[in-house]
């Protein structure tokens, strides 16, 4: 773009041609206020009003269809001596632009007054605003005349503070406008709308949806839904761009997500993934039928792409904002589709790393160990993975059965780790002595031994034949040591209510059991297993006895035949600790030819206990760095945290790899860029009935067919269904790409109290603030002539610094500044804590 030279407040500037004056002066570092302009929106093109809009059920018709060329008027500047709208006037060579003058200030204040006449403004002029509790008004201003919850971080408030609220502003009279229609995700207050039309421009220009529009009534824009009483009926995409650009509280997020980074509140799916997968970006590629690029997004953060697709419990879906509209995006199924259609092009981006000469031992080949091994090998370290069992994968192989995650797909994940350079030593258990040898012979050791120790149950009859640990059964089945008809025709009881217990129950059903009963301490609504696991188990005719615990196991001829139960009245104590209580007088019993105990797992920490143990036999470690008390030793995954999810273990492996690499002299940067991303395109386009689009689900085996084999229960998405489901995404993250409007500059800086500095002060009404040589405010005074008053201060021999603020209502402004100082410091300038006469 060709550049042109202009002058801004007398200073020559070279700016891009084709810009508006507002864009040009702001790029030159000069602030000009505006409430209709926004860095991502064009104000040069007039907006055309609609014939009608809806505000709730109210159908509003306009009285003027002429294009609207005016704006808020706050951005006015002088160009070669003539006033002009800087947001709508393009720059031209030779322009002399003046951004600040008494005439411009008066014009801007008048325009601000026109805006505030239709907006609650009592809080903007209140001397106690800085210390307001936001719940009770000391000035007894009616609630409908007060500002909203954005007060203190409102763009309109900042602009008003910069310009100064006009002294002759009349009291706001509520118009009685109803709030926007009650809808998901967003809320709105019509009385807070200043008709800046940013929301309309964002919906039309940025997103190309057009769910919002406006009509002209009595010369003023009135904004509403474009086609029907609700935004959903007007085909809104619920992206939140309108909320993001709104300068007041007229549009706000309905669900207030407290705490955390702004990104987590705006796009919670991304921050809700422990591994940090960029889920919105992943979904955009799938919506465009680009599964190869979509899987590259997954692999940038997770090397075990199949495990993360088939076996993840998808916490991202629990926080998906689409779920507040109807149903969350089926992220996990879409990850499976992308993994199944992986074209492998991402491999071309994996340059071989330079060897570092450092050796790292990884103990355990579960998801935490394999993830850490992959990234450490990719950083150039020599990595050896030690696995006690015959095959790698940990609980991925020995705890998750094929009907959920086929073994051949796990093998493909493991091959990715091997291809990175990690060496796997299988059938290589590490005892205390071997651990010491690894520590001595390595530059770093990562203990990721998992939580493979099944918890046992101490009840009468535990030693009867037919009573075994559920985890042992899963492991034996994975190793091919269980006959297909192991429980043929039997009634089987599974003790436990977690995900492993349900896996055991479903495995037993597939091994021929005629009836399976899951017995849990927790009530039906408190089962620790995921809801979808409970639903699948119930569909497979697995019975649940919730709220019971085993009292004893009875048998005949040394073999179990019956489970006697007692009523559980409490699982956790008042502090949330596991402390079950029972009513021993209430009992029941069920027949059982076999009993499987699946009441939890303990960390496999015994060989490493010399470094110290934490709660629940976990390895003691620093939660931030994952370092243990042993030099050169880190830990992560279930052995450090207790049993958690697969994706939590992957996240721990990532963190450990970064920390270990940094400790070995690397930069700790393990993220991989596997795509050349094109610039983000914020255009969404209209999709009729978008809000009501149903969640797609692939076909599933009928329950009767499931129990006859260990075949995958669920088919994958078709390409068409995957694209459809991905396109249901609200693209919440696009809000994060919007540039916030520039904030007004801070208050005028202090100047040294010298004759030269005072000579530049205008002889006009205003308030001055004096600071002593220690930087403490010593006086705040409103005077009719600032220059003369400061000259008198200097003549009196005062030293320090000063700053000024022009205001014809200087006595009122003096009172406001004194009140603010009192609230902030607990005393008046100079230490006058008890004398409040200055305030009046």
Image (tube, rainbow, N blue to C red):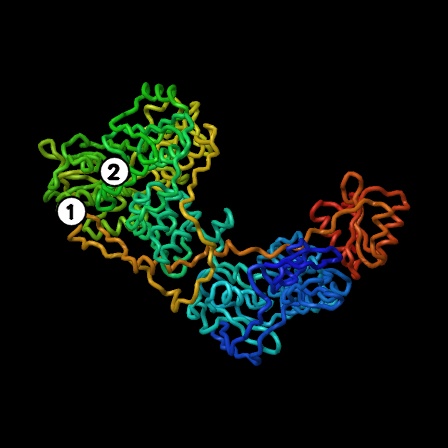
Image coordinates of residue 608 in percent, x first then y, are 35, 24
Quarter containing the N terminus: bottom right
Circle 2 sits in a helix, a strand or a loop, which is it?
helix
Q: Distance from label 2 to label 1 (Cα)?
A: 18 Å
Q: Where in the figure is residue 708, as x and y percent of width and height? A: 14, 48
Residue found at the far right of this picture:
795
User: Relative to 515, is 741 above or below?
Assistant: below
With respect to residue 607, does 369 lie above or below?
Answer: below
**Mark 2–mark 1 contact, CB under 8 Å?**
no
Residue 437 visible somewhere in the drawing:
yes
Which residue sits furthest front? Answer: 2
- Residue 415, by quadrant, is top left
Left/right placement of residue 704 relative to residue 664 reads: left
- Residue 225 left/right relative to 417: right
- Relative to residue 577, is residue 10 depicted above or below? below
Which residue is disc 1 drawn over? 709
Category of crowding for the residue at label 2, using alpha-carbon neighbours closer than 10 angstroms: few (below 14), some (14–19), many (at least 20):
many
Residue corresponding to mark 2: 397
Q: Is residue 584 visible?
A: no
Q: Position of residue 170 (x, y in %)?
A: 70, 69
Q: Nearer the viewer, residue 354 or 25?
A: 354
Residue at the extreme left of the image, as rendered: 557
Percent x, y for residue 171?
68, 68
Q: Compare marks 2 and 1 and give the one earlier in the sequence.
A: 2
Instruction: Answer above or below: position of 72 versus 537.
Output: below
Q: Quadrant of the C terminus?
A: bottom right
SS state under label 1? loop
């Amino acid at each position: 773009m060709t550049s042109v030279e202009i002058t801004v407040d007398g200073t020559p500037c070279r700016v891009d041609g084709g810009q508006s004056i507002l864009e040009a002066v702001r790029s030159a570092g000069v602030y000009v206020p505006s409430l209709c302009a926004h860095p991502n929106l064009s104000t040069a093109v007039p907006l055309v009003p609609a014939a009608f809009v809806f505000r709730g059920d109210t159908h509003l018709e306009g009285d003027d269809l002429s294009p609207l060329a005016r704006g808020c008027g706050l951005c006015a500047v002088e160009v070669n001596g003539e006033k002009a709208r800087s947001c709508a006037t393009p720059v031209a060579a030779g322009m002399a632009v003046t951004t600040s003058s008494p005439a411009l200030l008066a014009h801007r204040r008048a325009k601000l007054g026109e805006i505030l006449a239709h907006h609650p403004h009592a809080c903007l002029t209140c001397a106690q605003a800085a210390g307001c509790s936001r719940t009770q008004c000391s000035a007894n201003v009616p609630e409908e005349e007060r500002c909203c919850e954005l007060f203190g971080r409102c763009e309109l408030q900042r602009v008003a503070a910069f310009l100064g609220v006009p002294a002759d502003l009349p009291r706001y009279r509520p118009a009685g406008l109803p709030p926007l229609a009650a809808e998901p995700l967003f809320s709105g207050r019509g009385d807070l709308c200043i008709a800046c039309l940013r929301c309309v421009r964002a919906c039309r220009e940025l997103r190309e949806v057009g769910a919002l529009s406006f009509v002209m009534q009595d010369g003023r824009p009135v904004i509403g839904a474009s086609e029907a009483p609700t935004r959903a009926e007007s085909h809104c995409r619920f992206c939140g761009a309108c909320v993001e650009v709104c300068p007041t509280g007229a549009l706000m997020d309905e669900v207030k997500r407290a705490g955390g980074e702004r990104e987590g509140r705006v796009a919670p799916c991304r921050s809700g993934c422990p591994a940090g997968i960029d889920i919105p970006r992943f979904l955009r590629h799938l919506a465009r039928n680009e599964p190869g690029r979509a899987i590259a997004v997954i692999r940038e953060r997770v090397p075990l792409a199949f495990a993360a697709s088939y076996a993840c419990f998808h916490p991202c879906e629990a926080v998906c904002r689409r779920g507040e509209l109807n149903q969350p995006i089926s992220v996990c199924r879409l990850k499976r589709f992308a993994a199944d259609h992986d074209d492998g092009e991402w491999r071309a981006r994996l340059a071989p790393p330079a060897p570092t000469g450092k050796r790292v031992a990884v103990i355990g080949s579960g998801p935490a160990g394999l993830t850490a091994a992959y990234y450490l090998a990719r950083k150039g370290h020599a990595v050896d993975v030690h696995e006690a069992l015959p095959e790698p994968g940990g609980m991925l192989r020995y705890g998750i059965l094929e009907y959920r995650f086929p073994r051949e797909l796990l093998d493909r994940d493991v091959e990715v780790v091997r291809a990175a350079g990690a060496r796997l030593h299988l059938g290589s258990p590490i005892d205390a002595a071997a651990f010491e040898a690894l520590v001595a012979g390595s530059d770093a050791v990562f203990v990721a031994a998992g939580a493979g120790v099944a918890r046992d149950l101490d009840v009468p009859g535990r030693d009867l034949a037919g009573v075994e640990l559920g985890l042992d059964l899963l492991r034996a089945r994975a190793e091919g040591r269980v006959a297909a008809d192991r429980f043929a025709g039997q009634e089987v009881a599974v003790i436990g209510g977690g995900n492993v217990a349900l896996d055991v129950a479903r495995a037993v059903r597939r091994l021929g059991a005629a009836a399976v009963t899951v017995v849990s301490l927790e009530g039906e609504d408190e089962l620790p297993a995921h809801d979808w696991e409970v639903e699948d188990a119930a569909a497979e005719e697995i019975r649940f006895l919730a709220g019971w615990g085993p009292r004893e196991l009875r048998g005949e001829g040394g073999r179990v035949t019956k489970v006697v139960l007692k009523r559980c009245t409490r699982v956790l104590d008042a502090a949330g600790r596991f402390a079950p209580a029972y009513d021993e007088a209430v009992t029941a019993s069920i027949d059982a030819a076999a009993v499987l105990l699946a009441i939890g797992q303990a960390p496999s920490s015994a060989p490493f206990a010399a470094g110290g143990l934490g709660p629940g036999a976990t390895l003691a470690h620093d939660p931030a760095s994952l370092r243990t008390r042993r030099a050169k030793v880190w830990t992560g995954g279930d052995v450090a945290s207790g049993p958690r999810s697969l994706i939590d273990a992957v996240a721990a492996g990532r963190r450990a790899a970064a920390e270990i690499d940094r400790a070995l002299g690397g930069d700790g940067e393990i993220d991989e860029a596997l795509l050349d991303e094109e610039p983000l395109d914020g255009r969404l386009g209209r999709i009729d009935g978008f809000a009501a689009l149903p969640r797609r689900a692939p076909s599933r085996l009928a329950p009767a067919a499931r129990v006859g084999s260990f075949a995958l229960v669920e088919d994958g998405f078709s390409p068409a269904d995957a694209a459809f489901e991905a396109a249901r995404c609200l693209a919440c993250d696009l809000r994060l790409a919007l540039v916030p409007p520039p904030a007004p500059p801070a208050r005028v800086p202090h100047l040294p109290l010298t004759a030269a500095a005072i000579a530049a002060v205008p002889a006009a009404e205003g308030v001055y603030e004096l600071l002593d040589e220690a930087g403490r405010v010593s006086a705040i005074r409103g005077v009719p002539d600032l220059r003369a008053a400061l000259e008198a201060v200097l003549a009196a021999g005062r030293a320090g610094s000063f700053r000024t603020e022009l205001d014809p209502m200087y006595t009122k402004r003096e009172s406001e500044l004194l009140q603010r100082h009192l609230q902030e410091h607990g005393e008046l300038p100079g230490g006058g804590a008890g004398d409040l006469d200055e305030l009046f």
